[in-house]
Image: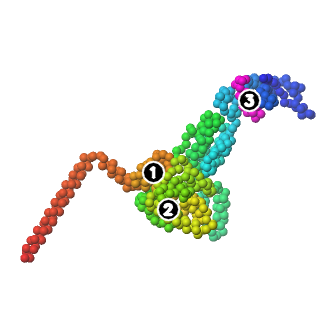
């Protein structure tokens, strides 16, 4: 195919505006003209011609080097590979039209062999949009991915070419997020200080009113209170990017996933702690929870259930407290999958919250599909609940919404999971018990089962965990008396001479005390006998 380099003068006739070309009087000057190249490319599939053209070279040597580069790219494919020929031709036509740098020959050879796109102009943002559009998961999961992409990934790395994304770029992104957190904390502190100062300024008096007005204007000019991007969110952002890049590798768009190698702060999951008497006393003094995840003792759980006995949703609190259902699972449990005669229910779905909207969904994992055994007391509670629901249905008549669920609003319609949480928190506050979250009732159920020496596999299956290791990791805090029993059992396994000596001394001391007690009793009897003899 034809190709050449040539000199070009861009000077124009001042009267006509046309390029002078070879008639330019300065054309023969050494540094006046620039050099250009043109290389014919393989015809398009419809038979039309196309070419690679580029100009602006300062000398013939630079122009010839790029022309050789173009020819080397064309030489990567054999004449018996029409598909490869078209791919290279399309790449060069795009590079020419968009004035992109010429692709590296060896990199292009590798891409051809791997079946990847030859022009790596796809940006991270473009790929993330394409990837998200192709996801087929529940709506709440899509929303979470969309938030990570919109709030974090696109602003920081969306402009970068996908094939040139590096670990260093991601390290810079997470460093910028951390710096942003510091800025948010500082701005929040400034706004909080201004709000607190405003609360101290009296309303009366011209000077006070002027001061209040100035403070309000300053507060309005400040950024609104914002949440920082915590370790858990940063890990989720990394997971979102990693998943999307893995799919890009699967589609042979890239060969390396930098998100798999970037290091960020680990997330330390809070351990569940039991509300012991000492922790309750400290909470009453300071109002602070020892851990975000707190578990009631059996006595505290019983006290709450007694307090909530008359609540319309008592059966839900009871079921979560004893059987460990998740909030969404309890809200979405149908009567059709609940067999009270056989003392079991089957978890097959849930109600999930997407923003403030509620939708039906399958369990999060395969292990979420499970059969949960019910004790006699729980069966009795559910039977009474069903009778009350039947009475509500008759009272509402034709207005009753037949969802078929165990736990509903008064008209039979879905419960909103968020409102269920709010109701639980109000009940806890009214009961006077130390605070826990609704999900902590599930933690409490797990702890009670472990305390009752239930096999860890049964506990894991009841909770819907995919692995017993998850159960062990989350529920390391057991009830105090269980820990003491384990400590005592362990101590008895080790024979100690010190312990034997202590026991022997204790036996001798008990024997001496018993002998002294007998002597004391005998002495009293003799004294009484002598006294009686004197009286006689």
Name the residue rendered at 58%, 69% in the picture.
395
Separation of marks 1 and 2 at Cα, in angstroms? 22 Å
Return the residue at label 2. 382
Compared across the picture, whether 142 is left or right of 451 comes to right
Return the residue at label 1. 459
Compared across the picture, whether 481 is left or right of 174 comes to left
527 or 218, which lies in front? 527
Q: Position of residue 448 (x, y in %)?
A: 43, 55
View extreme (bottom): residue = 536
Q: Residues within 10 Å of mark 2 (few under 14, many from 20)?
A: many
Name the residue rendered at 25%, 46% in the picture.
497
Return the residue at label 3. 86
In this rendering, which labeled residue sits more in front, label 1 or label 2?
Answer: 2
Does the magenta portion include 174? Answer: no
Q: Position of residue 324 (x, y in %)?
A: 48, 55
The quarter of the displayed image where residue 282 is located: bottom left
Quadrant position of the N terminus in the picture: top right
View extreme (right): residue = 15
Task: Examine the rendered structure and indicate whether residue 524 appears above or below residue 461.
Answer: below
The quarter of the displayed image where residue 235 is located: top right
Instruction: Find the magenta span and give its range.
Output: 75-101
Q: Position of residue 413 (x, y in %)?
A: 60, 62
**Does label 3 or label 2 sit earlier along the sequence?**
3
Quadrant position of the C terminus in the picture: bottom left
The quarter of the displayed image where residue 404 is located: bottom right
């Amino acid at each position: 195919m034809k190709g050449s380099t040539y000199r070009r003068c861009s000077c124009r006739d001042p009267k006509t505006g046309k390029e002078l070309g070879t008639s330019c009087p300065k054309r023969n000057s050494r540094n006046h003209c620039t050099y250009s190249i043109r290389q014919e490319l393989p015809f398009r599939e419809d038979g039309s011609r196309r070419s690679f053209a580029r100009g602006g070279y300062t000398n013939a040597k630079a122009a010839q080097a790029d022309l050789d580069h173009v020819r080397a790219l064309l030489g990567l494919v054999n004449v018996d590979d029409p598909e490869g020929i078209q791919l290279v031709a399309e790449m060069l036509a795009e590079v020419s039209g968009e004035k992109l740098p010429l692709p590296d020959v060896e990199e292009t050879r590798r891409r051809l062999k791997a079946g990847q796109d030859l022009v790596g102009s796809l940006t991270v943002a473009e790929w993330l949009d394409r990837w998200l559009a192709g996801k087929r998961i529940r709506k709440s999961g899509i929303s979470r991915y969309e938030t990570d992409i919109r709030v974090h990934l696109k602003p920081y790395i969306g402009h970068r070419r996908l094939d040139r994304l590096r670990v260093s770029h991601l390290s810079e992104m997470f460093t910028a997020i951390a710096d942003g957190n510091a800025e948010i904390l500082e701005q929040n502190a400034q706004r909080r200080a201004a709000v607190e100062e405003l609360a101290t300024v009296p309303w009366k008096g011209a000077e006070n009113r002027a001061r209040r007005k100035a403070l309000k204007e300053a507060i309005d000019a400040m950024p609104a209170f914002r949440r920082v991007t915590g370790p858990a969110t940063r890990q989720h952002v990394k997971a979102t990017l990693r998943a999307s890049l893995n799919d890009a590798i699967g589609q042979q768009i890239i060969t390396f996933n930098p998100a798999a190698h970037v290091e960020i702060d680990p997330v330390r999951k809070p351990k569940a702690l039991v509300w012991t008497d000492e922790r309750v006393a400290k909470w009453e003094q300071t109002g602070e929870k020892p851990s975000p995840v707190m578990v009631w003792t059996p006595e505290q759980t019983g006290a709450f259930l007694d307090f909530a006995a008359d609540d319309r949703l008592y059966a839900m609190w009871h079921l979560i407290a004893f059987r460990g259902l998740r909030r969404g699972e309890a809200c979405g449990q149908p009567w059709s999958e609940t067999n009270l005669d056989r003392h079991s229910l089957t978890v097959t779905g849930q109600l999930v919250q997407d923003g403030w909207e509620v939708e039906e969904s399958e369990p999060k994992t395969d292990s979420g599909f499970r059969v949960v055994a019910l004790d006699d007391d729980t069966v009795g509670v559910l039977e009474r609940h069903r009778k009350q629901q039947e009475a509500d249905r008759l009272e509402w008549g034709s207005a009753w919404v037949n969802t078929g669920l165990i736990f509903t609003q008064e008209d039979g319609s879905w419960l909103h999971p968020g409102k269920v949480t709010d109701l639980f928190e109000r009940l806890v506050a009214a009961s006077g018990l130390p605070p826990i979250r609704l999900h902590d009732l599930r933690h409490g159920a797990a702890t009670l089962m472990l305390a009752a020496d239930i096999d860890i596999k049964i506990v894991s299956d009841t909770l819907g965990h995919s692995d017993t290791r998850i159960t062990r990791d989350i529920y390391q805090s057991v009830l105090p008396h269980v820990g003491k029993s384990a400590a005592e059992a362990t101590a008895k396994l080790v024979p100690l001479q010190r312990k034997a000596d202590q026991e022997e001394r204790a036996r001798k001391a008990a024997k001496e005390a018993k002998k002294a007690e007998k002597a004391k009793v005998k002495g009293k009897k003799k004294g009484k006998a002598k006294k009686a003899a004197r009286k006689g």
